[in-house]
Image (tube, rainbow, N blue to C red):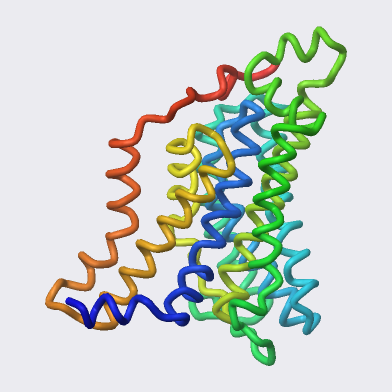
Amino acid sequence: MMDFVATLLTWGVLAQLVRIAVPYVLAALGGTLTERSGVIDLAIEAKLLCGAFAAAVATVESDSVAVGIVAGALAGASVGAVQAVAAIRLGAEQVVTGIALNLAAVGLTRFLLGAIYGHDESSLNIVGHDHTVWRSPIVWLAIALVALVVIGLERSRPGLRIRAVGEHPEAVAAAGASVVRTRWLALLIGGAVAGVGGAQLSLGVGQFVPEMSGGRGYVALAAVIMSGWRPGRAALVCVGFGAAETLQIRMQNLGGGLPPELVALLPYALALVLLVAIKPRTSAPSAIGKPWP
């Protein structure tokens, strides 16, 4: 037992935890922005996957990680824009919209991988770049974004409007501000942040693999709910999920007699248990899921 604990207390394991946790954290930040504006964000999975694909392709084609990160953000924002058209402009049911976007992202990334590189089942490898986690600009960008979103939602005028349209859109409209524009802003920024999380998925391991988001968007949404729609707490919950996934990987590598399929369920089982056990201190935004006007 002590030997197993000793294998967890290393810099290598800490680096692995950071690499795994960053996509969760950024996805949860993006989801918090979207949901605080009053739009249900089940499309986080699509934003992660499209961000991962766009970042990988842009990095390979431009030979620049910076270009890849920007491409990932733009891809996530594009998913947010489609979500905004459907949910805000057309008044579509928001849960169905999110699920449809997730399914579409799986098919679209496979199709584009095949159309561009001629293989839609294998991976796209990113060679010639240092994938060390401590040298990754996304890791430090994630830390800055956590602080920016936490402070911005609470202290800035755009943050106040985002929170207001999620709680009392009628009051925002009566004050002369645009509910639709504010929600569009939240969806675009939230999508871009989640897209950067997707970029970390592919750039952090040096390749894009079809469906590599692997349900992380749903886990991030669970973190948003468990945190009471507070970005700082959501980020901390996501670090916990990252630790659970890191433990799962170490257990698979070291063996121990447990079936690998059972060990692989650890992060998702933890999310389910915590979702049932933890009651958010604050309720969901009162206008979430309700179309406007």
Q: Residue at x 28, y 52 (%)?
A: 269
Toward which corner of the image does residue 82 lie, by quadrant?
top right
Specify the farthest residue to the right: 176
Q: Quadrant of the C terminus?
A: top right
- The front one of 209 and 261 is 261
Name the foreground residue: 206 vs 91. Answer: 206
On the picture, is 180 further left or further right than 290?
A: right
Residue 180 or 85: which is nearer the viewer? 180
Q: How many marks?
A: 0
Q: Residue at x 59, y 33 (%)?
A: 35
In percent of width and height, residue 69 lies at 73, 67
Taking depth in this image into account, of 36 and 157 the one nearest to the observer is: 157
13 sits to left or right of 274: right
Question: Which residue: 66% across, 57% down?
Answer: 195
The percent position of residue 11, horizontal first and vertical second, equals 47, 80
Identify the residue at the far left of this view.
Answer: 257
Q: Percent x, y for residue 98? A: 54, 40
Q: Residue 86 is drawn in which quadrant? A: top right
In the rendered view, does 8 fall on the left or right side of 136? left
The quarter of the image holding the N terminus is bottom left
The residue sitting at 56% across, 62% down in the picture is: 22
